[in-house]
Image: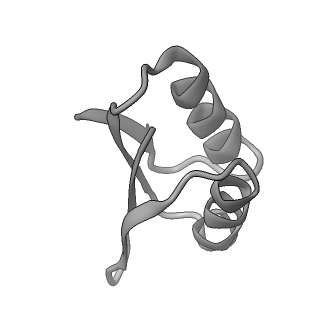
């Protein structure tokens, strides 16, 4: 699994890093994005949906969120 660390990053950096991981990835790669910027927790899933990528897991903790998806 590839981990995209977006902790302490504000928009649009988490989305940019997520898109870069998608471009660098291969079909069937599992990617997990970790961050703490609240708007990105909503923005990244919308972007994934528009690309036809299904989210496997979306969890929001007290200070950190995680989004997992498969290419």
Front position in the image: 46 or 64: 46
**Colour setup of the view:** one colour
Q: Give residue 61's position: percent from left, percent from top.
A: 32, 80
Q: On the rendered image, what quadrant is the C terminus found in?
A: top left
Front position in the image: 23 or 62: 23
Relative vertical location of residue 14 with respect to residue 22 in this rendering, above or below: below
- Residue under the point 64% across and 54% down: 48
Q: Is residue 65 shown to the viewer in this render?
A: no
Q: Quadrant of residue 15?
A: top right
Q: On the rendered image, what quadrant is the N terminus found in?
A: top left
Front position in the image: 39 or 63: 39
Q: Give residue 43's position: percent from left, percent from top.
A: 71, 64
Residue ranking furthest to the bottom: 62
In the picture, measured across the screen, residue 28 lies left or right of residue 54, that is: left
Q: Is residue 43 shown to the viewer in this render?
A: yes
Residue ranking furthest to the top: 24
- Residue under the point 77% across and 46% down: 12
Q: Quadrant of residue 68?
A: bottom left
- Residue under the point 52% across and 15% down: 24
Q: Quadrant of residue 5?
A: top left
């Amino acid at each position: 699994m590839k981990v995209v660390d977006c902790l302490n990053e504000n928009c649009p950096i988490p989305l940019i890093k997520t898109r870069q991981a998608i471009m660098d990835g291969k079909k069937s790669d599992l990617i997990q994005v970790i961050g703490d910027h609240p708007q990105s927790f909503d923005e990244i899933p919308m972007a994934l949906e528009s690309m036809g990528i299904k989210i496997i897991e979306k969890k929001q903790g007290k200070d950190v969120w995680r989004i997992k998806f498969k290419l």
